Amino acid sequence: MEARFERPDWEAIRESGRMAVDMHFHTSCSDSFTDVRSAVRLASERGVGVAITDHNLIESLVRLKDFDHDVPVIPGMEVSTSDGPHVLVYFYELRDLERFWYREIRPRLQECPWLALRDCPTEELLDMLEGESCVVSAAHPMGYFMTNKGVEVCIRKGYLDQDVARRLDAYEVICSGMTHGSNMESLDSALSYGIGFTGGTDGHTLHELGNVVTTSHASDIGSFLDDVAAHRVDVIGLEKTVPKKVHMASASLGKFMMHSPSALWVQTNQAVKSADRGARKAAGMMREKTTGLVETASDIETRLREIGKR
């Protein structure tokens, strides 16, 4: 299991007998304008598989039921939790994803459906996924744009316990939308927790597909996901250049503008909750320090009394 920061050679990977999958890709179902069928066609041309991981939604995967294709398409979803982190969930079977979505995700959708779910913190989501036939990875663990949209950044801020990371199968250690430094920190954290790797483009525009891949000697989706869970995969890819990041962000912004009032409300609400958590954490630390000072002063007073008695 290794992460290689280089442009993937799709043909060489294919000739080596390995399956390559972009494990993080968005379509017009959520915050992208990319048609899922166009994405699958391009994946076929490039000889890679793709995990369709729209935020909280699965419509594009359902549309593929009547579309003939010759590439592995992993049924997935990027869940936007209510406390910040984004969690990638990969199911072995679409029917299981559909069942889970209708039972747990659909009732929690907000007006802008691909933003943070209602009443779905990270640990509760992991509780829901217990017993499901799926593989779970933290998307861009270090977050982005100074937000809490990553598991690892929330752990480092004290909002989540390290045990949350150990409940996951993997961290996304190469996400092309992140900085190299953020990806290296995600990689180091995954190694320290003893969990696996995934990698994907977090693509929102068609041309990005396959520029980061997770590879395995598997020959089908089931054994590929087994390899992810068993730490038998490699991740290959590079971060996007700044102009490409700007292009992707511009494309995504157009979808957000269609839901601007509700999107702004959800984002503001999350920011307020994050600030509140930060304030409560700071207050707790201050109480601990104050308690320590009081205890120290009390100890000194006791010792002085003992000395006075002598």
Image: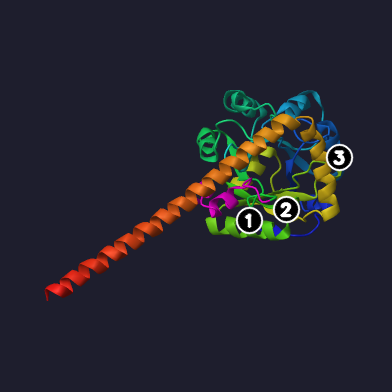
What span is colored magenta in the figure? 146-166
Q: Quadrant of the N terminus?
A: bottom right
Sequence-wise, the earlier of marks 2 and 1 is 2
Which residue is identified by label 1? 186
CA separation, marks 2 and 1?
A: 10 Å
Q: Eyeballing the image, is 258 above or below 142?
A: above
Type of amino acid under label 3 = Leu
Badge 1, how many Cα within 10 Å: few under 14, some, many 20+? many
Q: Secondary structure at mark 3?
A: helix
Q: Secondary structure at mark 2?
A: loop
Q: Nearer the viewer, residue 247 or 280?
A: 280
Which residue is identified by label 2? 178
CA separation, marks 3 and 1?
A: 29 Å
Is residue 50 rendered magenta in the image? Answer: no
Q: Residue 68 falls in which quadrant of the image?
A: top right
Q: Nearer the viewer, mark 2 or mark 3?
A: 2
Type of amino acid under label 2 = Met
Labelled pair 2, 1 in contact (Cβ < 8 Å):
yes
Is residue 18 something that shows in the picture? no
Q: Residue 192 falls in which quadrant of the image?
A: bottom right
CA separation, marks 2 and 3?
A: 23 Å
Which residue is identified by label 3? 42
Q: Secondary structure at mark 1?
A: helix
Is residue 159 rendered magenta in the image? Answer: yes
Sequence-wise, the earlier of marks 2 and 3 is 3
* Residue drawn where x is 85% and y is 46% of the image: 247
Q: Position of residue 32 (x, y in %)?
A: 79, 36
* Residue drawn where x is 62% and y is 42% of the image: 271
Q: Nearer the viewer, residue 256 or 139?
A: 256
Badge 3, how many Cα within 10 Å: few under 14, some, many 20+? some
Left-right relation of 202 to 246: left
Type of amino acid under label 1 = Ser
